Amino acid sequence: MLPADTRRHHLSLLLQCLADTGPLSRADLARATSLTRVTVSDLVAELLADGLVAELGTKPGARPGKPATLLGLVHDAVLIVALDLSDDTVLQGALIDLHGEIVTRDAVELGSARGDAAVDLVVALVQRLVATSERPVLGVGIGTPGVVDDKGVVRQAPNLGWYELPLAEAVGARVGLPVSISNDANIAALAECTFGAGNPDGLMLVAIGHGVGGGILMDGAMLGGPLLSAGEIGHVVVEPGGAPCACGNRGCLETVLAVPHLRDRLAAVTPDAVASELEAVGTTLGAVLAPIVTTLGITDVVLYGPAELLDGPLLGAVRAAVAERSMPVVAEHLDVRMASLARDVVLTGAAAHVRFTQLGVV
Amino acid sequence: MLPADTRRHHLSLLLQCLADTGPLSRADLARATSLTRVTVSDLVAELLADGLVAELGTKPGARPGKPATLLGLVHDAVLIVALDLSDDTVLQGALIDLHGEIVTRDAVELGSARGDAAVDLVVALVQRLVATSERPVLGVGIGTPGVVDDKGVVRQAPNLGWYELPLAEAVGARVGLPVSISNDANIAALAECTFGAGNPDGLMLVAIGHGVGGGILMDGAMLGGPLLSAGEIGHVVVEPGGAPCACGNRGCLETVLAVPHLRDRLAAVTPDAVASELEAVGTTLGAVLAPIVTTLGITDVVLYGPAELLDGPLLGAVRAAVAERSMPVVAEHLDVRMASLARDVVLTGAAAHVRFTQLGVV
DNA sequence: GTTGTTAGTTCACCCTACTAACAAACATCG
DNA sequence: CGATGTTTGTTAGTAGGGTGAACTAACAAC
């Protein structure tokens, strides 16, 4: 840690205040951060020079003393390149501003590309988006399926044929920008907390798609764990000795809750039995969630996946099952709901991740 | 954050290196921390002046160049006052050195003291221990039952009659030392990782006594959560509609696993059925742990409580149940065992907490 | 003895944030 | 309307922290 890191930290503090509270004067910032007005002025000057902050005129409201000049975040001063690699066929990309608004979209067919060829596609997509941007690019954020460590090494992502691949380093070297990489579900949880209504002190996102994954934020941080697998709820066994699962075990939650299995199951019953089938699955999920939610004291559980399947009897059953099996205090504070940002959670989460790593803004 | 914090951080880095690796020379420290030799010398001078570090003579091994002088931690340069308030009748205290070795013990009867009277007892015990110490006291660490926030405010501890009590502030003001307070189970988990064999990246401790509590360390940090209740596994419902619990719900894990209930249950069966009873309880606990362990990707589960009940068929059944219901990758890396430090976990954990907050040494 | 290597220190310099003092711009009150 | 008091933001000057360059000290190997 250099003395320059102190300065970066203080710059982050200021940006964080402006992001949380809206426009403030230098004196306001000094009070909020308990830095000196002098220091704040100096730091603000740097942010003004970078264009991240702009003066918005004098503060309204008639009070004695020299009128304050308000400072506000310039949300499109820089843009973030965000990639979502969670789809099997298409790599999604976007340019996103600091408020999480998508400015431009782009995509590339994955085709049969795997391994290095897939990396080439990622780099090409990033470069196209960078070329599109009319503003400086703050960095590149990537959400990928699989296991990713905190240094941007993809430990394994079978869908893309990546094993022990230092993707952040590789992409960073080729595009000349800082690159942040995370697991898609973890990053979706981050998006829910950053741009949605999620509580970063205790939120779990359950991603239901081809498989069942998830991500957890506790005390403001994404959980990783020794295996970098925190949040991976899909392979909790719900039916010992049940249907075999790709993981090697039997009766995993994924064998019941993953979208393909869910659709198969619904197709096998009469239309008027659909609701009760969904409820049964919801109850199963709730029974798995209850120990987790109670033990972690989580307040937000967010489901991410096809609303036509999840947002109805299933969600209701989850709520009921969790409430029945949790400590009352926890159940009172708990909110089980669908993800608020629907389809772009991974993209916006990748942007949030970059915003955090580069600017320190949560 | 002041520039002085940078220095404190660097001092912590050096202490951490010495604690992890054993005696090192200044040049070794410079390499390990990637600070300059100049800076390390300066920092070391400060640590030498404080007595936290001592020169141990020249480094053995014949190599060219000036021989290095080894520096080592002085583990009893300062002592820590640690308190364990988890017992209903006696407040335990100890003086503990930086290695977690107990130097002196002391205790005070709680009697019927509650509220402010209990605080007085705590202060008296601390003052007695401080007076006993032949070395400077680094700080006071307290492990208490109940809910404690990160600022040392006891939100509620019914056993002691404390509600919204700023205990750290109160005790700190009266004894003139920095005070760190945490939940007893959380702090026990910390002890297991600091002085025992626990993995701080993913460990859960389950404390089984009068009630059932717990603490979790993930990614090196104690989990708190929005309700400050992370780890509280006792009130997960294992038998919907089962026996009523103090929490207001029915069929909580605590109604099955808490020591009094466990003893009652064993007393009601014939001696040769004891093992199978314990196994049944162990299986229940394993079923609760499995979703948590799998979803967090935890590698260490530690049981803390009476070994004659836990360390046998019950532990074995927990292992089996968790393994059956978890993802194979997780089960492979998982170790379910008894706490290694037995009866002094809370005391040593409190010491570890102080060591961390005051010196930054994990 | 010479050479090369490693450890630890001295010195001059840069960066950061702070205190003290001040100018600008406003409200309020007699 | 002018004097007074407040608040904002800036301009010095200072103290603390870390760094690179160069130096001394101490040793092995030839």
Image (cartoon, coloured by chain):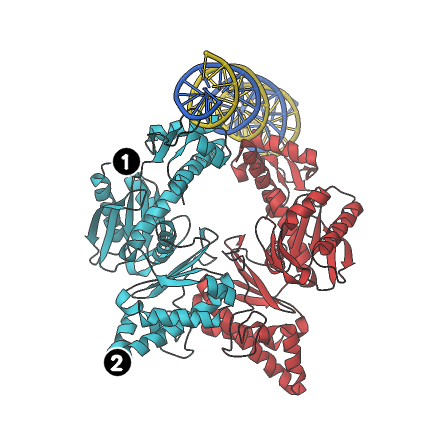
Chain colours: A red, B cyan, C yellow, D blue
| Of B124 and A37, the residue lying toward us | B124
Q: Secondary structure at mark 2?
A: helix
Tell which subunit mark 2 falls on: B
Query: On the image, which quarter does residue B312 sit in?
Result: bottom left
Can you identify the residue that label 2 sits on?
B272
Tell which subunit mark 1 falls on: B
| Of A284 and B27, the residue lying toward us | B27
The CA distance from mark 2 to mark 1 is 55 Å
Disc 2 crowd, CA 10 A, few/some/many (<14, 14-19, 20+): few
Nearer the observer: mark 2 or 1; the answer is 2
From this viewpoint, is residue B281 visible?
A: yes
Q: Residue at x 26, y 56 (%)?
A: B114
Q: Earlier in the sequence, mark 2 or mark 1?
A: 1
Q: Amino acid at mark 2?
A: Asp
Can you identify the residue that label 1 sits on?
B136
The image position of residue A154, as x and y in percent, is 61, 54
Q: Residue at x 66, y 75 (%)?
A: A260
Query: On the image, which quarter does residue A86 sit in?
Result: bottom right
B219 relative to A207, above or below: above
The image position of residue B293, as x and y in percent, is 46, 64
